[in-house]
Image: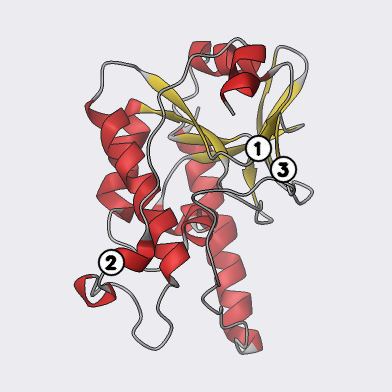
Amino acid sequence: MQERLQRAGLVADFFDAIDGRALDTNAFPTMDPSNPLSAGELGCYLSHVGIWKTVATGPDSHALVLEDDVQLRADLRSICEELQKTEIPFDLVRLGSQLPLRGLRVAELAGKWQLFLPTMDPDGSYAYFVSRQGASRLLDTLRHPRHPIDRELNLYWRHQLRILALSPPVVEHDAESVSTIMPSGRATVNTSLHFLARWRRSILKRWSIYQISRSLN
């Protein structure tokens, strides 16, 4: 990972991942006892929370956060510089997704990249650019684990967080690497919502995303 960062012209601080197997899940009452996070998911979640604390109290206005199982594209540094200059008051920008992005277009950067408020969930929390203010807002809302971190970021609209996604992506998940933060096992997600409940959720999601888009102007 160090070599990849050097090739991209980036200097990094490294943080040890939290081992969820060493934690007492009873110490986290916000989790659904009928569907708790796996040890890997809990460690992954708390590792991100630890990074947010560092960013929120640190001297830098923004930070690039990468898990260790990623491939970096040559223009990663350029997009970070563009994001740092933009006046869009984002909390966090997801820089990679293993799924096609769909959403409400917010802006174009340098004639090369598009910023979206996702309407279809991106996949992964392995690469993002977060503002110091955004890190504080993330802590205010997501400090205590309830769901896997990917899912909580996907539910940004419910939390009224300004979480954008970048297209095309500048970071890719490296399936051949073994991450020290990769969740082991997954909590299940109940998708058996009644039709009316799904319809109501869809309307609420669209309205919330529209409200967030207005806050970015």
Residue for badge 3? 174
Tell me if residue 18 comes above or below residue 61 in the rendering: below
Which is more N-terminal, label 3 or label 2?
A: 2
| Apparent side of residue 33 relative to residue 212 in the rendered image (left or right) | left
Classify the position of the N terminus by image quarter: top right
**Looking at the picture, which amino acid does disc 3 mark?**
Asp
**Looking at the picture, which amino acid does disc 2 mark?**
Leu
The answer to whether the residues at label 1 and label 2 have Cβ atoms under 8 Å apart is no
Q: Residue at x 34, y 85 (%)?
A: 33
**Residue 135 appears at what percent x and percent y?**
34, 36
Tell me if residue 214 comes above or below residue 13 in the rendering: below
Tell me if residue 34 comes above or below residue 4 in the rendering: below
Name the element at disc 2.
loop
**Residue 163 appears at what percent x and percent y?**
51, 41
Tell me if residue 50 comes above or below residue 148 in the rendering: above
Dot 2 alpha-carbon crowd within 10 angstroms: few under 14, some 14 to 19, many 20 or more: few
Dot 1 alpha-carbon crowd within 10 angstroms: few under 14, some 14 to 19, many 20 or more: many
Q: Residue at x 33, y 47 (%)?
A: 49
Q: Residue at x 67, y 39 (%)?
A: 96
Q: Residue at x 28, y 53 (%)?
A: 143
The answer to whether the residues at label 2 and label 3 have Cβ atoms under 8 Å apart is no
Q: CA distance from mark 2 to mark 3?
A: 28 Å
Which is more N-terminal, label 1 or label 3?
A: 1
Name the element at disc 1.
strand
Q: CA distance from mark 3 to mark 1?
A: 5 Å
Depth check: 7 or 107 in front?
Answer: 7
**Looking at the picture, which amino acid does disc 1 mark?**
Val
**Residue 161 appears at what percent x and percent y?**
42, 45
Residue for badge 1? 70
| Apparent side of residue 148 relative to residue 206 in the rendered image (left or right) | left
**Residue 145 appears at what percent x and percent y?**
34, 63
Residue 128 location, quadrant: top right
